[in-house]
Image (cartoon, rainbow, N blue to C red):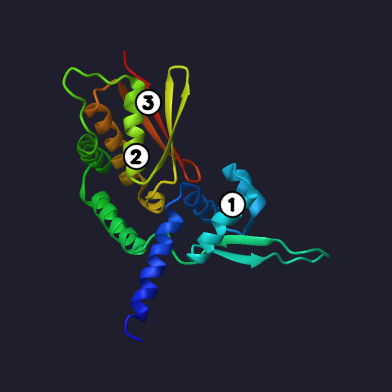
Amino acid sequence: MPGTSTHAIGYDTELTYRALADPSRRHLVRLLEDAGRPMEVGALAGHLGLHPNTVRNHLDLLSRAGLVERSAEKRTSPGRPRILYSSASQDARSPGAAGYKFLAEILAAFVETSVDDPASAVEEAGRAWGRYLVERPAPNVRLDSSRLVERMLSTLADLGFEPEEAREGEDIMIKLHDCPFRDIVRSHGEVVCSIHLGILRGAAEELGGSVTVDKLSPLVEPSLCLVGLSARS
């Protein structure tokens, strides 16, 4: 018996991390959470733009990690029932996730009730961290808008987002998929999103200011936020 439980815990944790290391698998978990109902492979493949066999492989690993659950379709007509997938009942997205969520809820609620202008206060705090999180260009080096946005995308990825750049003429947009703080946004959106807006603005300023961050539109779709940017001449 000695050592048995330790090995099991270590294996489960490693499997969870491995399952969530891939962006497509994280996206699958989010899709099933947002759907709130079982979904079949074809529909999930359509959302991700992947081949159904690739999605099946991802779902198999997520299922073994306890992140999604499989069930057979209940049919009232002849035919082989489809296999359906749903989000696991427990919040197993990462070890200790429930504890971090609880702490974030406490801190966000405290700021909301203890500060006169919570959004401005936390945006300024986020701005300071945004300046800290990026590496300032060398003296006399000015990053153009493309290089600056590239640096910002890298920083956002490090924070747990899945950022994607989109451009329409002079308009620059960053699509933020899979917000790691989405659950807290639903109850304390002003605080959480203002922090993120501050981080983005601080990062842009530290990188030379060739781009300004105009706005952050949270959860315009499930698991999607939009950041509007402007290039400065």
Q: Which mark is residue 229?
A: 3
Locate the C terminus and report the quarter of the image it occupies: top left
Q: Which residue appears farthest toward the right when viewing the image?
A: 78
Of circles 2 and 1, the one toward us is: 1
Q: Quadrant of the N terminus?
A: bottom left
Q: Position of residue 106 (x, y in %)?
A: 28, 58
Comparing labels 1 and 3, the label whose residue is closer to the camera: 1
Percent of width and height locating residue 155 = 31, 38
Task: Write the residue at 25% across / 43% down.
Answer: 118
Does residue 116 sit above or below 1 in this rendering? above
Q: CA distance from mark 2 to mark 1?
A: 25 Å
Dividing the picture into quadrants, the one containing residue 11 is: bottom left
- Considering the numbered disc 2 on the image, is that residue within a helix, a strand or a loop? helix
Q: Secondary structure at mark 1?
A: helix
For marks 1 and 3, the one nearer the N-term is 1
Q: Given the image, on which type of amino acid does mark 2 rest? A: Leu
Image position, residue 188 (x, y; %): 35, 50
Give neighbour class at mark 3: few <14, some 14-19, many 20+ (Cα, 10 Å). Answer: many
| Nearest to the observer: residue 108 or residue 9 | 9
Residue kind at label 3, given as amino acid type: Leu
- State left or right for residue 9 relative to residue 203: right
Decide if residue 5 is in sight here: yes
Establish if 59 lies above or below 27. Answer: below
Residue behind mark 1: 55
Q: CA distance from mark 2 to mark 3?
A: 15 Å
Q: Residues within 10 Å of mark 1 (few under 14, many from 20)?
A: many
Q: Nearer the viewer, mark 2 or mark 3?
A: 2
Question: Of label 2 and label 3, which has the lower sequence position?
Answer: 2
| Residue that numbered label 2 is attached to | 156
